[in-house]
Image: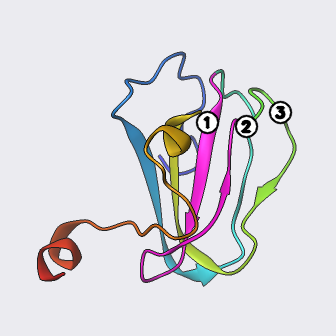
């Protein structure tokens, strides 16, 4: 599932995305091969803080889109969602027990 990601997806509901969770932090990279929709790709550190965002990625591109530092999570969203929701490097991903504890 992680290798396929959002490849071959032709549309994505506005409130939907795909979260990639890795076992440890590392320099991560994604590509848009066989991805037909433009995405915002959010790279987050192990504590959920946003490290970098690649906005409005080019569909079907083979260009590598890499994190700017070691990260543990990648969140793919429809292009434009990060701007609309004001998600930036001051933001943090929260979910599950982490969210409940904060």
Q: Which range is magenta?
A: 37-56
Describe residue 51's horizontal placement relative to residue 44 as left or right: right
- Disc with the residue nearer the chain's start (3 vs 1): 1
Residue that appears at 52% across and 45% down: 82
Q: Residue 43 in the image: x percent, y percent?
A: 59, 64
For residue 61, which numbered disc appears in the image? Answer: 3
Q: Residues within 10 Å of mark 1 (few under 14, many from 20)?
A: many
Q: How far is the residue under mark 2 from the one under mark 3?
A: 8 Å
CB within 8 Å, label 2 to label 1 = yes
Q: Secondary structure at mark 2?
A: loop
Q: Nearer the viewer, residue 1 or 29?
A: 29
Q: Residue furthest right?
A: 63
Q: Residue at point 72% right, 79% down?
A: 69
Which residue is pictured at 12% across the width and 74% down the height?
100
Q: Badge 2: how crowded within 10 Å, few (<14), some, or many (20+)? A: many
In this image, 61 relative to 95: left or right?
A: right
Measured along the vertical axis of the image, is residue 37 above or below residue 31? above
Residue behind mark 2: 57
Residue found 43% across the figure and 54% down from its top? 19
Please provide percent x and percent y for residue 83.
55, 42
Residues at marks 2 and 1, CA–CA distance in whole angstroms:
5 Å
As for residue 43 lying within the magenta part, the answer is yes
User: Does residue 70 show up magenta in the picture?
Assistant: no
Which residue, given by chain and number where applicable, does mark 1 sit on? Answer: 39
> Which one is nearer the viewer's eye here, 24 or 16?
16
| Residue 22 drawn above or below residue 82 | below
Badge 2 vs badge 3, beta-carbon distance below 8 Å: yes
Q: Residue furthest left?
A: 100
> Image check: 93 left or right of 80?
left
Identify the element where label 3 is drawn. Answer: loop
């Amino acid at each position: 599932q992680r290798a396929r990601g959002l490849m071959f997806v032709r549309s994505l509901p506005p409130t939907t995305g795909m979260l990639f969770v890795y076992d440890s932090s590392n320099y991560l990279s994604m590509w848009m091969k066989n991805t037909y929709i433009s995405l915002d790709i959010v790279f987050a550190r192990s504590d959920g803080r946003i490290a970098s965002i690649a906005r409005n990625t080019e569909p079907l591109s083979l260009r590598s889109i890499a994190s700017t530092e070691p990260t543990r999570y990648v969140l793919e969203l429809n292009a434009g969602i990060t701007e609309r929701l004001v998600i930036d490097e001051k933001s943090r991903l929260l979910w599950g027990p982490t969210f409940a504890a904060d």
